[in-house]
Amino acid sequence: MILGRRLQERRQNAGVSLEDAARTLRVTPLTVRRLEKAEVALKPLYVELLLGKYGADRQEIDEFVALAERANEPGWWHAYRDVVPSWFSAYVSLESDAAMLRTYEPHYVTGLLQTHGYARSVLRGGFPNDTEDELRRRIDLRLRRQSLLDKPDAPTLWVVMDEAVLHRVVGSDAVMRDQIDMLLAAMELDHISIDIVPFAAGAHVGACAPFTYFRFHEPELPDIVYSEILSASVYLDQRADVVAHLEAHNRMALLTSSAESRALLNRLRKEYS
């Protein structure tokens, strides 16, 4: 995405039209547009030819080509491609590079904060036909994603979840107790915030599908919102869509407080003892 936006900017600064750029590559203008929007992989040769057309010097071309080669390298999650739906692999990539994540969860604890036992029960319920090996690999992927929060430059994570999440017994009382302990421990970390919308809040703006908002360090990358249904997902980067989800997240967070959320977790932990 970064490379595509930089190529678009370089083309526009050089005064080269999409049609002229397309003739350089012997492709259609639509293909060039898709390259700039990161809808298809950028071949290093294409990058070199385009930058030559745009009047770039050798050093700039080499830097862009190196970035293109890096962009085409598979991420660590590629090893799990047999158990990762194609529509979810982009999520893992965005998550790995995010500076900030804000998520709303009406059904389950967010994957980044799940214990092994909780993750196993959730994934077994979601993929009932998996073999034990497939289930193990899904669990491994989910837990490996959590290492993101242990990095020195870990992103900030702000979770808003419905109280219903904590009443849905996933696995067993022991699993739920361990999961609540993990949430309480996470709340003590400076870069993690957890707000639980109580039943008493009634109907609210977020009573819908779960979603995650991503913000990145790189100025070329737009803020992105991800949401999913049973067998597919949607990635939104239009400003109006992103703002609508951010406003919903803010409104839900105002329905509770950290102290109230912590008290609720402690009360429910006792119920699962």
Image (cartoon, rainbow, N blue to C red):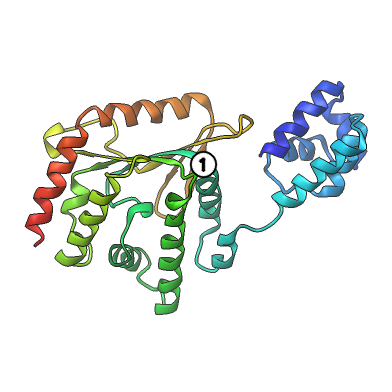
The residue under the point 39% across, 31% down is 245
In-front residue for pair 115/248? 115
Residue with the most extreme bottom position: 132
Residue 182: percent from the left, percent from the top? 26, 55
Mark 1 Cα within 10 Å, few/some/many (few <14, many 20+)?
many
The residue under the point 53% across, 28% down is 238
* Quarter occupied by the N terminus: top right
The residue under the point 67% across, 43% down is 39
Location of residue 202 with respect to 133 vertically, above or below: above
**Three-letter code, disc 1:** Ala
In-front residue for pair 212/265? 265
Q: Quadrant of residue 168?
A: bottom left
Instruction: Work out whether residue 49 can be spotted.
Output: yes
Residue with the most extreme front position: 152
* Quarter occupied by the C terminus: bottom left
The residue under the point 82% across, 48% down is 44
Q: How many marks?
A: 1
Q: Quadrant of residue 134?
A: bottom left
Location of residue 158 with respect to 10 vertically, above or below: below
Classify mark 1: helix, strand or loop.
strand
Instruction: Work out whether residue 50 can be spotted.
Output: no
Location of residue 223 with respect to 180 vertically, above or below: above
Location of residue 248 with respect to 160 vertically, above or below: above
User: What residue is disc 1 on?
Assistant: 98
Residue 257: percent from the left, percent from the top? 20, 32
Q: Is residue 266 left or right of residue 248?
A: left
Residue 93: percent from the left, percent from the top? 56, 50
Residue 268: percent from the left, percent from the top? 11, 51
Q: Is residue 231 left or right of residue 177?
A: right
Q: Quadrant of residue 18?
A: top right
